[in-house]
Every structure is written in structure tokens, then in C-alpha cells.
Amino acid sequence: MRKLLLAVTLGVVAAVAVAGVAGAVNTYVISIGKTTPDKPGSAKKPVPVKLGFGYKVGDTENLRPSVINQYYIAAEGIKYFANAVPKCTFAQADASPTFSSKCKKAVVGKGSIANAFGASADRTAKAPCDVKLTLINISNGKGVGKKNGGIAIRIDTGPPDCPLDIHGSLVAPIYNVKLDGIASSEYRFKVPDSLVHPAPGVDNSVIDVVTTIPKKVRKYKGQKVSFASSVGRKGKKRTLRVTFVSEDGHKETAIQQFPK
């Protein structure tokens, strides 16, 4: 009887442990959102701004987050004036081990990505991989149109920041959207399997992203703009929105107004 009770108890513990993992879900927080200067602007009179934003991905059971391979990122009233800024080709932005010197004037932002990776079957594993992020204004690439343009999301890392040596870019076309009823730009990108699964049976999860798009004023069609410029805002706060898409197509959206 005692052996049977012990067996039942162990079975319950195992079931609870499995249920705990099975019930674990990703959490999403927009951690940073700031425009400098903090002015609404308008379509007729855009305000060139410095844009800072960031987001964090966690897990309800403190495990390594499940893999996300698509992202949509937008800030209320922030339009990207891609045609006002120098460009280079996607091939030049994707060159290895460093992007082409022809892209230097096309750099529109910088930041960092913190990742955690480990065996797909063991989400308690959280080996770090820190990545340098560069945003480059590009003239072509899948989905990049002449009207709205697109960004190459350049990723660079290697030992000691990451055991893997990675140098390359992702294509992020820019789309016109409305956020809180205000015309805005949204860039969307998909992360290739080679990055979310850097080896067979291994998952790589993004956990913390910080990006800054600096203010660099240029004249464009009679207006003074920066790559990121404010053309409106519904109220005193600005809404930021990030949509996360998992490999099975499930979408979750994080929304936050700033200043908090």
C-alpha cells in the first residue's frame, strides 16, 4: 500500500510539473517609449524626433520564452521618411563580416538585443547571446516599396558576447497604418529559421530589445524632417504597439502609452 501511495504521489508530482510547463506562456512588455522633443506635430508640419523604444519577452513560469519569429512595431503618429534619407541596397546591408561602407550614411538607428537559447526540450536552459543591432535604410528587398521604403535590421555578434558568430540583416518593409486613429508607420519583419533555431533541437528566444533612432534633420519636399518624425498624436500620451507572432501563427499584441 505504501509503495502504491508513493507511486501515485510521484505520478501526481510529475503531472503537476508537466502541467506547469504546458501552462507556461510568454509575457510581453513595452519597456521604453520616448520621443524627443515630445510634440505632436502634424502631416503639414512634421516634427523631427529622436525615437527610443524597447520591449521585453518573459514567461509566466520563469522559463525561456517560446520562440517568436515575426514582429510588427509601430508608434502612434510616428512616420518614417525613408525617401528623405540616404539608402543602400539590401545586399550591401547584408554583407559579411561588416556591412558595406556605402551604407554608412544610410544608418538610421542602433540598439541591442539580448537572447536566451537552449535545447528545445528544456526551456529552463537560458544561455545568453547578446547582439548589436543596426537599422539601415534600404532601397530594395522583399516587400520594400518605393513609396514607404524599408529597413535592414542588421545583426552582429560573436564571442564573448555570444558563442555564435553572426553577421547579417533582415528585411523590414515599412507600412502605413493607423494607431489610435492617427496615421503612423509600422515596420514588419520575419526572423529566419537559422536564427530562431541556430542548430537542430535548439531554440533561440529574444528577451530584451532596446533601439534608438536619432534625430537628424533634413529637408524633404519643402519640410524639415528626420527619418522618424511626429505627424500627430491623439492626446498627451503616445501609444506604442508591438505585435508578436509565434511559429504557429499565434499573435499577441503589447500596447503601452508613454510617458507612463
Image (spheres, grey):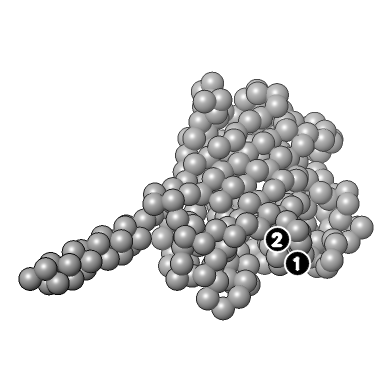
In which quadrant will I find the N terminus? Answer: bottom left
Q: Quadrant of residue 55?
A: top right
Disc 1 packing (10 Å; few <14; some 14–19; many ≥20) = few
Q: Residue at x 88, y 48 (%)?
A: 105
> Spatial distance from mark 1 to mark 2, Cα to Cα?
7 Å
Q: Residue at x 51, y 49 (%)?
A: 57
Q: Which amino acid type is marked by label 2?
A: Cys
Residue underneath mark 1 = 165
Quadrant of the image occupied by residue 236: top right
Q: Disc number at residue 23? A: none
Residue 70 % position (x, y):
54, 60
Left or right: 23 with respect to 38?
left
Please say if the residues under marks 1 and 2 sit with CB atoms less than 8 Å apart.
Answer: yes
Q: Secondary structure at mark 1?
A: loop
**Extreme residue in the left direction:** 1
Residue at the spot 82% in from the left edge and 35% down from the top edge: 216
Q: Amino acid at mark 1?
A: Asp
* In the foreground, 168 or 173: 168
The answer to whether residue 100 shows anywhere in this view is yes
Measured as percent of width and height from the top left, residue 59 is found at: 43, 51
- Residue 10: x percent and y percent? 23, 66
| Label 2 environment density (alpha carbons within 10 Å; few <14, some 14–19, many ≥20) | some
Residue 48, image x, y percentages: 74, 31
Tag of residue 162: 2
138 and 164: which one is in front?
A: 164
Q: Does residue 178 appear anywhere in the picture?
A: no
